[in-house]
Structures are given as C-alpha cells and as structure tokens.
Image (cartoon, rainbow, N blue to C red):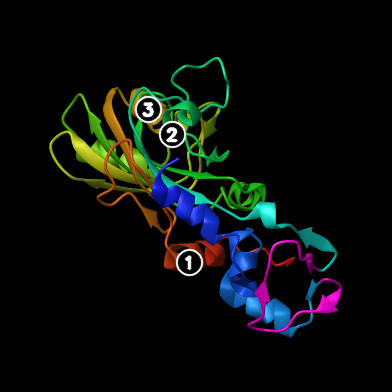
Amino acid sequence: MSNRIREEFLQKREPVRLNKYLSEAGVCSRREADRLIEKGRVSVDGKPAQTGMKIIPGQVVRVGNRVVSRQDEMVVLAVNKPRGIVCTEEKRERDSIVRFLRYPIRVTYVGRLDKDSRGLLLMTNNGDIINRMMRASNCHEKEYKVTVDREITDDFLEKMAGGVHILDTVTRPCRVEKLGKYTFSITLTQGLNRQIRRMCSALGYEVKDLLRVRIMNIRLGSLKEGQYRQLTDGELEELYSLIKDSSL
C-alpha cells in the first residue's frame, strides 16, 4: 500500500463530521445529511444527532432504523479502463478489472464496459450507491466517442439517433454528433448489452474503437489510461442529486 493510501486510511480513523460520515457511507450528500439531522432522522449512540457534531470509531450512527457502520465508509473511483480488461469479479479471469486495479480494499464496478472498449468506469465499495445508480439506469446519461470502419453519413447519424432495432427491441432515441470522417459521439440513456456495437452493426458499420468519456456528471477528462482517482466532493454532491432516493 502506498504512503498516500495509508495516510488516507489513517485519516478515516480520526473524528469526522457527521454529515461527511454519512456521505462517505453512501447514505446521502452532506447537504442532505444536514437536513436529515435537522429533521431528527439521525441518532448517535441512541441520542438525537446535532448538526456539526463529530463521530469517532465505535459510535453507533443510525438513519431511521438503519445502522451506518464505520466500515461502510464509501470509496468511489473514476477509472480509465484499458482495452482488454474484463469487467468481472471472476477470480479465474486473469484480466479482470479487480486484478488490474489492485485497490487496497474491495471495490466493484458500476455498469460494465465490454472487453474491447475503454474509458470511464466507476468503481465503489458501497452497495447502496450501486443500487441507486442501477435504479436510475433507465435515465442517466453515458457519453461515448466511437470510431467506425466506414465514412459516417447523415443517414447513419439520423438512424442512430432515432432508434435502431436490436435484441428484439428498438433503442431509445439518443444524441449523436459527427466528430470526424469516421468518428462520432453518442449519449445513451440505457445500457443494453454491447448496445453501440450492435447498433452500428445493424446499420452496416463496424466499431473500431469505443471510448466512454462520461457517466452522468463524471467525466474522464485527462485521467490517463490504466489510472484511477477518487471523485471530488463536488462530483459526489452532484452525483447524489442525480440519484437521490426520496425514501431517505
């Protein structure tokens, strides 16, 4: 484990503000946490929580009847997955994303990228945020940059945007923009198996390169291939607002 990661782990053992604690546990954003505290929905060691209070290891935090434990502290990573790496937790797969990343604690992916595709992948240790993103998967945006084997025509762009018949269904209308002679961007709001490759194939095109550049508000940016980074507080705040669960 690197010194940086070791320091991060040690810092998490220090007292932390309750709203940050709830955010890192995957319960809600810090702003929403403050609202829950003010409404009396949060308790610490059986007593009503106070805004601004700090939590130390061993204290019992509840949101409603749900216990939020210290070991649930959330990690959310933006990963630039290389081509050839497989989104699986299968231990026998030598090229699995888990083996490749070698993160010091267990994290798993949120939404797949197929083996031949590359780009942005989110990984986390928190099942709650995974479930929320999966529940929101019928509307959240994912943006890709795609290179194909033939010159892109207006007819191709129009058909891709309007919906293509694959897998016994018609794909949802989406945004498509030509970037170059053989390259276009596409923003999807659904996640059918190998959707973009199947859409292109149905229209007589073969995908040569597929790069995911955005998931909801999280962008690949300048993150180098094979590298990862923690999401910023601002990114997490906006992400929570997009997957907000009204049951909190």
Three-letter code, disc 2: Leu
Callout 3: SS? helix
Q: Residue at x 51, y 17 (%)?
A: 93
Three-letter code, disc 3: Arg
Residue at mark 3 to residue at mark 1: CA–CA distance = 30 Å
Work out whether residue 242 or residue 172 is closer to the camera in this orientation and state it.
242
One can see residue 117 in this view: yes
Q: Is residue 1 above or below residue 60?
A: above
Q: Residue at x 31, y 37 (%)?
A: 211
Q: Residue at x 54, y 56 (%)?
A: 10
Residue at mark 2 to residue at mark 1: CA–CA distance = 25 Å
20 lies left or right of 77: right
2 or 1: tag closer to the N-terminus = 2
Q: Is residue 57 magenta?
A: yes
3 or 2: tag closer to the N-terminus = 2
The label nearer to you, 2 versus 1, is: 2
Image spot of residue 143 (x, y percent)? 36, 47
The N terminus - image quarter? top left
Please name the residue that numbered disc 3 is placed on.
Answer: 197
Q: Is residue 148 magenta?
A: no
One can see residue 188 in this view: no
187 lies left or right of 70: left
Please name the residue that numbered disc 2 is placed on.
Answer: 101
Please name the residue that numbered disc 1 is placed on.
Answer: 238
63 lies left or right of 182: right
Q: Is residue 113 above or below residue 136?
A: above
Bounds of the magenta segment? 45-63
